[in-house]
Amino acid sequence: AQSVTQPDIHITVSEGASLELRCNYSYGATPYLFWYVQSPGQGLQLLLKYFSGDTLVQGIKGFEAEFKRSQSSFNLRKPSVHWSDAAEYFCAVGATSSNTGKLIFGQGTTLQVKP
Amino acid sequence: NAGVTQTPKFRVLKTGQSMTLLCAQDMNHEYMYWYRQDPGMGLRLIHYSVGEGTTAKGEVPDGYNVSRLKKQNFLLGLESAAPSQTSVYFCASNYRGGRSSYNEQFFGPGTRLTVL
């Protein structure tokens, strides 16, 4: 069965600093991978997704993620964090063998940005 | 386009009461999903539907029922609410396109439910 682990429950970074949020997945083949962001009191918004091809994926709001098959990871990065990036971030995985579009979400990482 | 909307936004129930949460989408999406979000547990799939008239169980279906009588609506029912069902409920929809069913899931704003 698929699973997703986000090892960091809470991360604090200073505004302007770089950011990396970790995501590890468990799946027998190459899965479809997603990062979503949730601002307080809001629904989830897609940041980026990986299906195949180039392992470095660009998303919205200046975020990028790199798929590393050997490490079963899909870490999210941003070179310079803005105060508006404070939110909860979810990594999700979908089974390539499925025709339902179902996703398995990680536990989430809360990002706090210090001024 | 309103996207995905959820009704109500907030609700307080007493143990044993019943209620229905409504999800509506105006994007003509085939797939719809109900999740619950609890602190430290991410989003967990309750039920989902791959088309009008079809539903299936997700990861945590016990205590919930669903119906998809119209393509644009996906209803989540609690027949006898329990305190363990206190949560934030999110609906999402997705379109079937290309070679994959894995396109972006669009989320509603959520319903915060408290069961006393």
Image: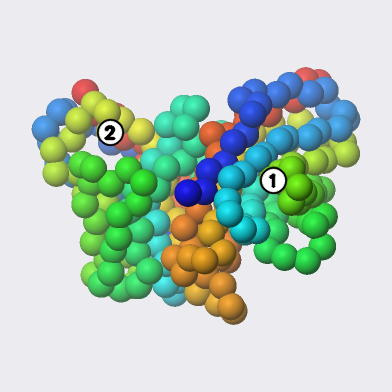
Give the image quarter of residue A11.
Answer: top right
* Residue lying at 57% horizontally and 41% vertically, measured from the top left: A4
In this rendering, does residue B106 appear at all? no
Estimate the x, y position of residue A110 in percent, counting from the top left: 63, 28
Mark 1 belongs to which subunit?
A: A
Amino acid type, callout 2: Gln
Q: Is residue B37 above or below residue B95?
A: above
Where is residue A28 drawn, in percent x and y?
58, 54
Along the line of sight, the residue nearer the viewer: A12 or A69: A69
Q: Would you place residue A12 above or below residue A68 in this image?
A: above
Residue indicated by mark 2: B85
Callout 2: few (<14), some (14-19), or many (20+) C-alpha neighbours within 10 Å?
some
Q: Is residue A103 visible?
A: yes
Asked if badge 2 and badge 1 are on a common chain, one would say no
A44 lies left or right of A76 = left
Q: Taking B79 as reference, is A9 left or right?
A: right
State the residue at coordinates (74%, 51%): A69
Q: Provide the secondary structure element on which disc 1 rests.
A: loop
Kindly report the distance in space between the C-alpha atoms of the residues bearing marks 2 and 1. 33 Å
